[in-house]
Image (cartoon, helix red, strand yellow):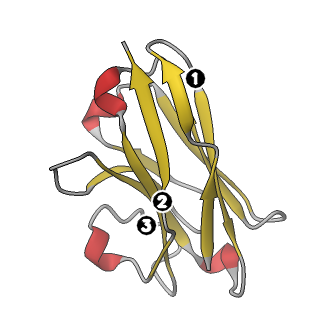
């Protein structure tokens, strides 16, 4: 089970840190990802982190503004977002893939096994 938190209403240029807590599984073996879905648009990949290494990978639109990290002791993955823009407004979802390759980051949402319910991020101009 995955539970996101940390969303909210912020102004352009502000920062937010999203958290995703995992329970009921072996978090350290999960590759994790953050996705987002804006109204009327398809869900898109934002950032991912491998189970080991860890390795990270970002969507091009992130452009060094977002950082994904994980704390296996807390069974939590984070998405630190800075320099937020109105176009970052979306529901943000975390996802977990079990039994993947240790150092692989998964960009395709169909690869993921578990999903959280999402947290709303709204950036005003």
Residue beneath the point at 43% across and 14% down: 12
Horizontal side of residue 122 vs 30, given as left or right: left
Q: Quadrant of the C terminus?
A: top left
The answer to whether residue 87 is above or below residue 98 is above
Distance from label 3 to label 1 (Cα)?
28 Å
At label 1, counting other C-alpha atoms closer than 10 Å, the crowd grade (few under 14, some 14-19, many 20 or more) is: some
Foreground disc of the pair 2, 1: 2
Q: What is the total number of numbered labels drawn onto the structure image?
A: 3
Residue beneath the point at 18% across and 56% down: 42
Name the residue beneath numbered marker 2.
118
Residue 104: where, in percent of width, then height? 43, 67
Residue 45: where, in percent of width, then height? 31, 53
The mark nearer the N terminus, 2 or 1, is 1
Between 2 and 55, the one lying in front of the other is: 2
The mark nearer the N terminus, 3 or 1, is 1
Name the residue beneath numbered marker 1.
15
The circle drawn on residue 35 is none
Q: Quadrant of the N terminus?
A: bottom right
Residue 57: where, in percent of width, then height? 40, 48
Foreground disc of the pair 2, 3: 2
Name the residue beneath numbered marker 3.
104
Is residue 52 visible in the rendered image? The answer is no
Horizontal side of residue 84 vs 52, given as left or right: left
Residue 37: where, in percent of width, then height? 29, 51
Name the quadrant containing residue 27.
bottom right
The answer to whether residue 56 is above or below residue 122 is below
Is residue 2 visible in the rendered image? The answer is yes
The answer to whether residue 46 is above or below residue 62 is below
SS type, badge 2: loop
Distance from label 2 to label 1 (Cα)?
18 Å
The mark nearer the N terminus, 2 or 3, is 3
């Amino acid at each position: 089970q995955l539970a996101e938190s940390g969303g909210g209403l912020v102004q352009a240029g502000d920062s937010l840190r999203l958290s995703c807590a995992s329970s009921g599984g072996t978090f350290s073996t999960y590759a994790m990802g953050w996705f987002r879905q804006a109204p009327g648009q398809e869900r898109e990949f934002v950032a991912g982190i491998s189970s080991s290494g860890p390795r990270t990978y970002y969507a091009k639109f992130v452009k060094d503004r977002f950082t994904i990290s994980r704390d296996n002791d807390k069974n939590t993955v984070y998405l630190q977002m800075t320099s937020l823009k109105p176009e970052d407004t979306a529901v943000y979802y975390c996802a977990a893939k079990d039994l993947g390759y240790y150092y692989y980051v998964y960009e395709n949402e169909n690869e993921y096994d578990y999903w959280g319910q999402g947290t709303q991020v709204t950036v005003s101009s």
